[in-house]
Image (cartoon, rainbow, N blue to C red):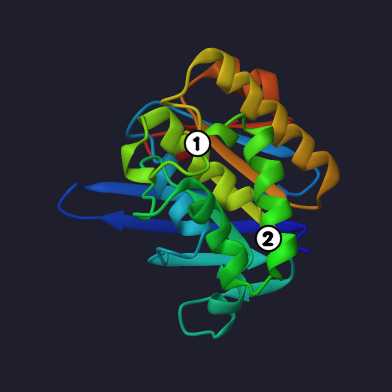
């Protein structure tokens, strides 16, 4: 279990874009569904990439519970295995939907019976079981988003990062996915962080909303 993540005096600069993420102090716990709200270019995706350990900050510290993580430490690789990250424009493999959703379970060496059971259940939950045998490269953008989220949630990561998870999905499906996210938060001890530009969505699902503007947190 990862019960908390803390970012302390984080600076991440991008050139030639000139964008800088600057987080003085941000504490996140698994007691909440955290929603990072902000307009395009505010730094939402950058923040998730730093938290996911895909990008290392130029300055500052990231604490997972009481463990300080730095690029030089071996702990990064171990922690990454506990983090599920759905990017804003996810990539699916050139295989059918069932195989795409199952891939994380196979990598983690789940037994076939449990893999099949988990995948079937989450496909039904997401109302995409009819796409099970469909090649993922022939899906609509909204269907790709649903499959990508299911692909992560099926193996129940300890940290769940969702970057604009419903950006390309219709209103009814958005509410359905929000319901699943809230249910997962109730049943698992996962720490959940979602980004959105929609304040309505933040109000619906967040128990802790973080406002991000120009790479800085505003309370």
Few, some or many residues within 10 Å of mark 1 (<14, 14–19, 20+): some
Quadrant in which the N terminus appears: bottom right
Placement of 101 over or under 62, stated as above or below: above
Which residue in the structure is indicated by mark 1? 131
Few, some or many residues within 10 Å of mark 2 (<14, 14–19, 20+): some
Q: Quarter of the image holding residue 39?
A: top left
In this rendered view, identify the residue nearer to me: 29 or 176: 176
Placement of 201 over or under 145, stated as above or below: above
Residue closest to the far right? 187
Q: Quarter of the image holding residue 167?
A: top left
Task: Find the distance from the CA under tag 2 to the CA under tag 1.
Answer: 17 Å
Quadrant in which the C terminus appears: top right
Q: Which mark is residue 115?
A: 2
Placement of 165 over or under 17, stated as above or below: above
In the displayed structure, does residue 101 sit left or right of residue 109? Answer: left
Is residue 211 at all visible to an observer of this figure? no
Residue at horizontal 36 percent and vertical 30 percent from the top: 140
Residue closest to the far left? 16
Q: Earlier in the sequence, mark 2 or mark 1?
A: 2
């Amino acid at each position: 279990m990862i019960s908390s993540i803390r970012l302390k005096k984080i600076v991440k600069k991008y050139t030639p874009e000139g964008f800088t993420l600057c987080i003085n102090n941000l504490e996140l716990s698994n007691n909440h569904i955290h929603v990072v709200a902000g307009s395009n270019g505010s730094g939402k995706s950058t923040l998730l990439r730093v938290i996911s350990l895909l990008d290392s900050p130029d300055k500052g510290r990231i604490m997972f519970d009481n463990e300080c993580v730095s690029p030089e430490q071996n702990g990064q690789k171990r922690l990454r295995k506990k983090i599920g990250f759905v990017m804003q424009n996810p990539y699916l493999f050139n295989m059918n939907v069932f195989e795409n959703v199952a891939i994380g379970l196979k990598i983690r060496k789940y037994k076939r019976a449990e893999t099949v059971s988990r995948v079937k259940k989450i496909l039904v939950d997401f109302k995409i079981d009819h796409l099970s045998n469909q090649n993922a490269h022939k899906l609509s953008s909204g269907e790709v988003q649903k499959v990508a989220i299911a692909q992560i949630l099926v193996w129940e990561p300890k940290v769940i990062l969702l970057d604009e998870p419903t950006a390309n999905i219709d209103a009814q499906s958005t509410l359905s996915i929000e319901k699943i996210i809230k249910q997962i938060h109730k049943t698992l001890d996962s720490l959940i962080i979602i980004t959105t530009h929609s304040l309505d969505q933040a109000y619906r699902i967040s128990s802790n909303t973080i406002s991000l503007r120009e790479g800085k947190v505003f309370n």
